[in-house]
Structure formats: C-alpha cells, structure tokens
Image (spheres, helix red, strand yellow):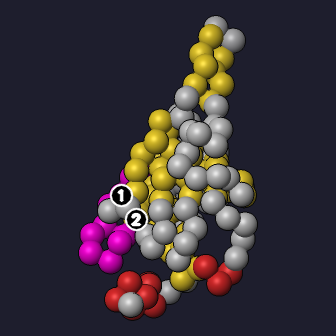
Amino acid sequence: MNIELIEIPKIENVLGTIGVVENNTIPFEMKRVYYLYDIPSSASRGGHAHKNLRQVLIAISGSFDVIVKDGFSEEKITLNKPNMGLLINANIWRELDNFSSGAVCLVMASAVFDESDYIRDYQTFLEYLQG
C-alpha cells in the first residue's frame, strides 16, 4: 500500500520537546497545513481519496485511527505520538475515526484545496482505480 510512517525530528530538553517539520522532513513541498479538533469520539472524518494530493497526518494531541484502503487491501493505523506522521500518497482511500478526547490531527498537504482532486464515493474510487 502506498502509505508510510515518518518519524518527525524532535528536540528534547528539560523544558519540553519541540517537533520540527521542514520541507526536507516530508517527501513533498507543503502547500497547505490545516488541523482537525473538537471531533466527537463517535464522529468519522475523511471518507474520501485524492487523485493527486499527498498528505502527512500527525496526532499532535490524543489519538485517532486512520483506515486506509487501496482497492485491494485495508489497514488500520493508530496515530498517538506527535513525533510520528502518516504519509498518505495519491489514490488511497482514508477514513479517520475513534478520536480520543482532546485529539488534534495536523495535516500537511502537497497542494492547495481543489475539489476536483477529491473522490468522495468509495464505489467511484474503485472504478477510478480500474481506469
């Protein structure tokens, strides 16, 4: 599957820890950064794929599950460490759920928002993969 866990460099000392993300930390140039928060534990986010966009998701606080599908297999990754990011490349279906109280999901994206890049229906996604 076209996903990868990426370790985010950190600087630790007695005063706390700093996580450092620069363009050489992730395999694309960041064009957009956004974050999800105040998500009820019963809510689900995502539920789409991107034709071209690449993203890195980080659980800045708390935890959540990311279910990824490539049309053949499915994998569930729990993000719960602010120094670990999940790289999701293009043509991967993603669903985010099981948000803990206070969870914050930081997303770094390879492009600005473009509705035409989204596939929001799973059956349409499977058909898109078929060509």
Indicate which label's residue lies in the foreground, 2 or 1: 2
Residue in the image at 45% along x and 73% along y? 91
Q: In which quarter of the image is residue 5?
A: top left
Secondary structure type for disc 2: strand
Q: In this view, does 51 lie to the left or right of 126?
A: right
In percent of width and height, residue 107 lies at 63, 54
Choose between 43 and 35: the one closer to the eye: 35
Taking the image as drawn, is residue 30 in sight? yes
Q: Which of 61 and 53 is in front in this view?
A: 53
Q: Residue at x 40, y 65 (%)?
A: 68
Q: What stretch is highlighted in magenta?
A: 69-78
Q: Please, what is the three-letter code of the amino acid marked with disc 1?
A: Lys
Residue 100 against residue 89 in the figure, above or below: above
Residue at point 43%, 70% (across, down) = 92
Place of residue 58 in the rendered image (x, y in percent of width and height, measured from the top left): 56, 46
Label 2: few (<14), some (14–19) or many (≥20) C-alpha neighbours in 10 Å:
many
x and y percent of residue 131 in the render? 38, 90
Q: Relative to 124, is 13 above or below?
A: above
Magenta run includes residue 47? no
Marked residue nearer the N-terminal end (2 or 1): 2
Residue 72 colored in magenta in the image = yes
- Quarter of the picture containing the N terminus is bottom left
Please give the name of the residue rendered at 69% of the width and 12% of the height, measured from the top-left corner: 15
Structural distance between the alpha carbons of marks 2 and 1: 6 Å
The reply to whether the C-beta atoms of the residues labelled 2 and 1 are less than 8 Å apart is: yes
Q: Return the mark for residue 76.
A: 1
Q: Which quadrant holds residue 36?
A: bottom right
- For disc 2, the marked residue is 68
Residue 116, quarter of picture: bottom right
Q: Position of residue 59 (x, y in %)?
A: 56, 44
